[in-house]
């Protein structure tokens, strides 16, 4: 639902942007209709690219992203585009578009959107082909530099190149258009470049950490106490809530010891038995419930691999969670049947883990012997298991 709201918001912002720029440019009525068709064409291209990037995990590394962050960035860029419509030719800070959209999304989405903003400005308030080519070149430059900025490479050089390109490129195209140099264009380019660089610094520090891996944010959010599924489980099945919390806690520590994904193991440990929470205690019902709550795909895959009933674990994290849950269940059974003084915790843990490893359950998981030994070493020393 949130994804639909995001897509509708993007479409509305596109129409609003065109409407305002058409008013600024005194566009004729028949041209308004043409602009409407251009808006639809651009929106369909953007929608196709968004869905493709989402399904290939190229957008926030999350196939179930709701596009909220990209929508927010797109609306900001639309506002900047409207402001640019009031600015003189060859002074518009169009490099803001690719930098912001690349940090939130990726360079392809940044280039597509930045190109459209420039075309829109050219059609409505500019009409200068040299200005359009100049802005498109700046958008391409911005997309390339933003990709490097996203990867924390040569940041000082990026800002220097941004300022240099903002001065040189408009100066060249202004001369090609008018056959004369303009000091005001050079000064405007320098100011524009510094503004873009400042915004780039702010965006890199604020937005990049948020968009680096949206999946991790989601994994952390769904195990918070105020998440609806957590509150409901705590209210209606406190024993399962305690079990999930305990497995999650142990899985996090084991993942740290083995160098695996701690956020995934935390969420996977808590929701591993989600199928057992359902009325018919079905793995698929649990998976369907996870899909309904828009859980990240890599978490849903772990839930689908519950105790290897439908498929053996396919990742080291899935193997670790199964290992921890199976160990805790076995220890709980023994504690209920045998007095603590009659059994050795460390020997039992080693024996249980060796049995699980030799069963073939983890053959497809990619869990290395080094991972296994580190996990086993941690679990035998964990005080919470004693």
Image (cartoon, helix red, strand yellow):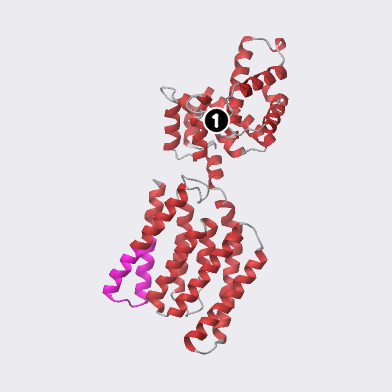
* Relative horizontal placement of residue 46, taking residue 212 as reference (left or right): left
**Relative image position of residue 38 (x, y in whole percent):** 34, 66
Tell me: residue 5, above or below residue 146.
Answer: above
| Residue at image mark 1 | 313
Q: Is residue 386 visible?
A: no
Of 192 and 378, the residue lying toward us: 378
Q: What are the residue bounds of the magenta stretch?
A: 13-39
Could you say which quadrant of the image residue 364 lies in?
Answer: top right
Would residue 23 be counted in the magenta stretch? Answer: yes
Prevalent SS, magenta region:
helix
Q: Residue 113's spot in the image, x, y percent?
A: 45, 63
Using the image, determine if residue 311 lies above or below residue 52.
above
Q: What is the x, y in percent for residue 334? A: 63, 13
| Residue visible at 63% across and 19% down in the picture | 355
Q: Identify the secondary structure beneath mark 1.
A: loop
The residue sitting at 38% across, 49% down in the picture is 4
Which quadrant of the view contains residue 375?
A: top right
Can residue 344 be seen here? The reply is yes
Callout 1 crowding tier (Cα within 10 Å): few <14, some 14–19, many ≥20: many
Q: Is residue 89 above or below residue 368?
A: below
Closer-to-camera residue (290/314): 314
Which quarter of the figure is the N terminus placed in? top left
């Amino acid at each position: 639902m949130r994804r639909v709201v995001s897509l509708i918001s993007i479409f509305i912002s596109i129409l609003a942007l065109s409407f305002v720029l058409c008013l600024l440019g005194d566009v004729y009525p028949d041209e308004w209709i043409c602009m409407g068709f251009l808006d639809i064409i651009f929106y369909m291209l953007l929608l196709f690219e968004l869905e493709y990037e989402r399904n290939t995990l190229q957008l926030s590394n999350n196939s179930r992203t709701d596009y909220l962050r990209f929508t927010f960035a797109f609306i900001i860029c639309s506002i900047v585009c409207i402001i640019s419509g009031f600015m003189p030719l060859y002074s518009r800070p169009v490099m803001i578009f690719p930098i912001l959209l690349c940090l939130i999304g990726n360079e392809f989405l940044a280039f597509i959107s930045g190109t459209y903003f420039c075309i829109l400005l050219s059609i409505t308030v500019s009409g200068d082909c040299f200005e359009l080519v100049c802005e498109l070149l700046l958008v391409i430059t911005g997309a390339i530099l933003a990709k490097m900025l996203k990867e924390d490479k040569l940041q000082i050089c990026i800002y220097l190149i941004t300022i240099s390109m903002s001065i040189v490129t408009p100066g060249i195209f202004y001369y090609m258009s008018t056959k004369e140099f303009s000091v005001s264009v050079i000064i405007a380019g320098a100011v524009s470049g510094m503004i873009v660089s400042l915004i780039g610094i702010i965006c890199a520090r604020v937005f990049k950490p948020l968009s680096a891996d949206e999946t991790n944010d989601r994994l952390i959010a769904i195990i918070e106490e105020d998440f609806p599924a957590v509150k409901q489980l705590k209210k209606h099945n406190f024993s399962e809530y305690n079990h999930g919390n305990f497995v999650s806690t142990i899985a996090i520590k084991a993942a740290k010891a083995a160098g695996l994904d701690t956020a995934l193991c935390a969420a996977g440990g808590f929701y591993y038995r989600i199928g057992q929470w359902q009325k018919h205690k079905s793995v698929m019902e649990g998976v369907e419930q996870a899909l309904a709550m828009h859980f990240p795909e890599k978490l849903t895959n772990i839930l689908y691999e519950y105790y290897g009933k439908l498929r053996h674990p396919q990742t080291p994290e899935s193997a670790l969670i199964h290992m921890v849950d199976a160990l805790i269940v076995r220890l709980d059974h023994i504690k209920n049947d045998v007095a603590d003084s009659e059994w050795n915790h460390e020997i039992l843990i080693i024996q249980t883990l060796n049995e699980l490893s030799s069963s073939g359950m983890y053959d497809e998981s990619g869990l290395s012997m080094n991972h296994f030994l580190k996990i086993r070493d941690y679990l035998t020393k964990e005080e919470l298991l004693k």
